Amino acid sequence: MKTYGFYGGQTCPESIAVDGLIEAAKRILPLKACEFVNYDFQVSQHEELKQVVSEWVERRGNIQMPPSKVMITTGSMLAITCAVNVLTKPGDTVITDEFAFMGALASFRHFGLNIIGIPMDEKDGMDIDALEQTLKDLSDKKIKPKFIYTTANYHNPTTAVLSIPRRKRLIELAQKYDVMILDDDCYGGVNFEKEPTPKTLYALGDPESIIHVGSFSKIVAPGIRLGYLIVPERFTDQIIIAKKVFEGGTSFFTSSILAEFLKDNLWSHVEKHNAIVKTKRDKTLEALNRYLSDYGTWIKPRGGLFIWVRLPETIDTFRLDQLAEKSGVRYDPGRIFSTDQKEVTCLRLSYAHMPEDDINEGIEVLADCVKRCMD
């Protein structure tokens, strides 16, 4: 039976710059080979990749970003884990969107945190009025959240883009209640529109009250396992210790090759990569409109790797999961992104890694499963 894997957060195989990475490896390995005998925390390493991150953050946010402020991590998930470890202790309260990256939620639960989800809409993101009321209610109870976590650009899973007015109000409220912001920009580089991706919360706010997380997984490939973290200076030493505990060292071998490739190709590579992803987004939307428009609703993503599909409240999602799996279709059910782990009639469809020729057929099979579950 043929299978259709609309799950996970993988990028496009077609967009991986194989030739460019091979040439970068040929150039850099003879120069760096003697340094590979060291762990990354024994000497000051990753300097070239930090410079790439610095350029990336500066150009997208119109801010100054010294490379010395950047920490390279084994993917953005490790960056989030380190930040949570430093900022919290079991029993602390954290705030996030009502739907959020399942990896971040797993980390919060692992550390024994009380998670409060804020309602959001699928276009403009977190409901800031609801956030304000929540912060006020917690303050009245003498509870101070440790941070507000959100993915402002191309939110995972909904692909919402937090509007600029909402970003500014979120920053103002965080300052008013003295709460840190954990700014996850994992998908910020995957933009399909002529307008640039909105500035990150980090670029708009006070860098001393915001931790900024980013990744190369979504603009190059997840398998390289490289991300980055920018933290207020007062947390630097603690983050370094946390990195040693949870990571044991980031691959200097991989970061050297990636930096050598991206130093001259960053922007052109991202442009080519996003064009490929956009084509697959469009094909997925066409198929959804063709086969599922009578049963589901969704918003055209402005960026990212997903489409968030909302189905009728009357559908039996567990039956749909079983039927879809038997039919060869896999997706991410909405419940795994829920802060309170409630059942929701939503699906996250990941399309970037799907072969173009399989997208239409896969959505047709999924739509048939949905229709059968509505009988």
Image (tube, rainbow, N blue to C red):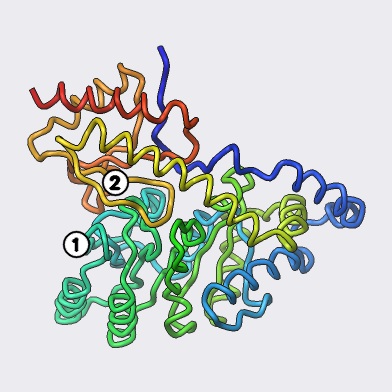
Q: How many other residues sit within 10 Å of disc 2, few (<14), some (14-19) or many (≥20)?
A: many
In this view, 245 is above or below 308 = below
Label ID, residue 119: 1
In this view of the protein, which residue sits in the foreground, 3 or 32? 3
Mark 1 and 2 residues: CB-CB less than 8 Å, in contact? no
Residue 344 horizontal side relative to residue 350, left or right: left
State the SS at label 1.
loop
Residue 27 place in picture, x, y as percent? 87, 52
Q: Which residue is at a point 73% across and 63% down the rendered structure image?
A: 263
Disc 2 marks a residue whose amino acid type is: Trp
For this orientation, the residue located farthest to the top is 1
Q: Quadrant of residue 330?
A: top left
State the SS at label 2.
strand
Nearer the camera: disc 1 or disc 2 = 2
Image mark count? 2
In this view of the protein, which residue sits in the foreground, 174 or 259? 259
Q: Quadrant of residue 302?
A: bottom left
Q: How many other residues sit within 10 Å of disc 1, few (<14), some (14-19) or many (≥20)?
A: some
Disc 1 marks a residue whose amino acid type is: Pro
Q: Quadrant of residue 371?
A: top left
Residue 318 place in picture, x, y as percent? 19, 29
Residue 237 place in picture, x, y as percent? 60, 74
In this view, 109 is above or below 286 = below
Looking at the image, is mark 1 or mark 2 earlier in the sequence?
1
Label ID, residue 37: none
Residue 233 horizontal side relative to residue 195, left or right: right
In this view of the protein, which residue sits in the foreground, 101 or 235? 101
Instruction: Measure the alpha-carbon separation of dots 1 and 2.
Output: 16 Å
Residue 133 place in picture, x, y as percent? 15, 76
Q: Which residue was labeled with disc 2?
A: 308
